Image: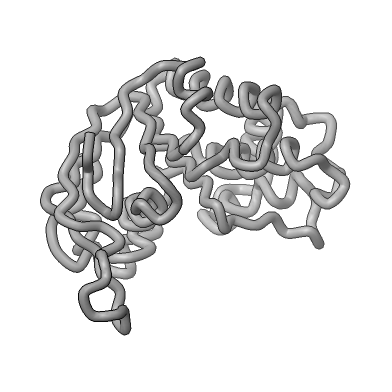
């Protein structure tokens, strides 16, 4: 089952900001259907990362309603948030791998947190690594991997819980065109099996190469 998304008149302002400064999100409204592949576009600071942080209940909206599968995630209790996140695959710009653990350990960590039995967790972690083409590197330390390989480990960690919604914030940033194409193909493969995918990017060439609907943000507002 895929996940639907709805933002209804959502604003996000941070305390301590300069009076009159633009909000991170300003009355943003849009809908994404279950099973859809959508690009979230806009310049740096347009509000793309804020959208993802609100969807994952990392932050709460100042105003408006954020729905995932008709559930108001902005009003979830702290105890309910982990159950929401088990349904999400999240690749954030500030997400970091643990360099004191192996690739396998990094990918299997969300399963350990969720209480999945070790034998089942091992099978699922290896399946996720196989999907991103890194099964042969499971015992490597992430620091020994290339930038593109490290990004694929992050993706494997994001999908190991078999999410219904996959969110990726600039996953191809700072990668060459070849690696960017490989990573985008991974997301398209997940979409092909019914996962809702939202990919934030400012790479117009990438969007032209793999067309899909785009939602454009500028200064916190939906402009297209």
Give the x, y percent position of residue 172: 59, 36
Left or right of 149? Residue 219 is: left
Q: Is residue 58 left or right of residue 156?
A: left
| Total numbered badges shown on the rendered structure | 0
Q: Nearer the viewer, residue 203 or 157?
A: 203
Where residue 32 sits: x, y (%)? 24, 32
Coordinates of residue 48 in the picture (x, y in percent): 38, 49
Pick out the residue farthest to the bottom: 16
Which residue occupies the foreground of this view, 140 or 211? 211
Is 175 situated left or right of 44 in this image? right
The picture quadrant where one finds residue 60 is: bottom left
> Residue at image x 23%, y 28%?
33
Q: Quadrant of the N terminus?
A: top left
* Nearer the observer, 213 or 52: 213
Q: Give residue 128's position: percent from left, percent from top.
A: 63, 32
* Residue 40: quarter of image: top left
Q: In this orientation, does residue 83 appear?
A: no
In this view, 125 is above or below 109: above
Residue at 79% in and 59% down: 99
Q: Name the residue: 22% across, 40% down.
A: 223
**Residue 214 makes an appearance in the image:** yes
**Is 180 placed above or below 56 here?**
above
Say left or right for 209 vs 106: left
Q: Quadrant of the C terminus?
A: top left
């Amino acid at each position: 089952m895929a996940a639907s998304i709805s933002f209804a008149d959502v604003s996000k302002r941070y305390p301590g900001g300069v009076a009159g400064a633009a909000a991170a999100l300003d009355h943003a409204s849009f809908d994404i259907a279950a099973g859809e592949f959508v690009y979230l576009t806009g310049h740096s600071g347009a509000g793309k990362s804020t959208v993802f942080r609100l969807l994952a209940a990392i932050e709460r909206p100042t105003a408006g309603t954020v729905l995932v599968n008709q559930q108001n995630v902005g009003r979830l209790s702290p105890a309910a948030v982990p159950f929401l996140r088990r349904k999400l695959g999240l690749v954030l710009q500030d997400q970091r791998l643990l360099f004191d653990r192996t690739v396998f350990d990094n990918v299997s960590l969300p399963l350990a947190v969720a209480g999945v039995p070790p034998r089942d967790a091992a099978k699922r972690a290896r399946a996720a690594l196989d999907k991103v083409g890194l099964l042969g590197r499971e015992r490597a330390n992430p620091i020994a991997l290339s930038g593109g390989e490290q990004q694929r480990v992050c993706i494997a960690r994001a999908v190991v819980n078999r999410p219904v919604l996959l969110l990726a914030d600039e996953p191809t940033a700072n990668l060459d065109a070849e690696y960017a194409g490989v990573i985008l193909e991974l997301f398209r493969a997940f979409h092909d099996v019914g996962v809702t995918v939202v990919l934030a990017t400012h790479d117009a060439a990438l969007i032209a190469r793999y067309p899909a609907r785009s939602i454009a943000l500028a200064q916190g507002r939906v402009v297209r």
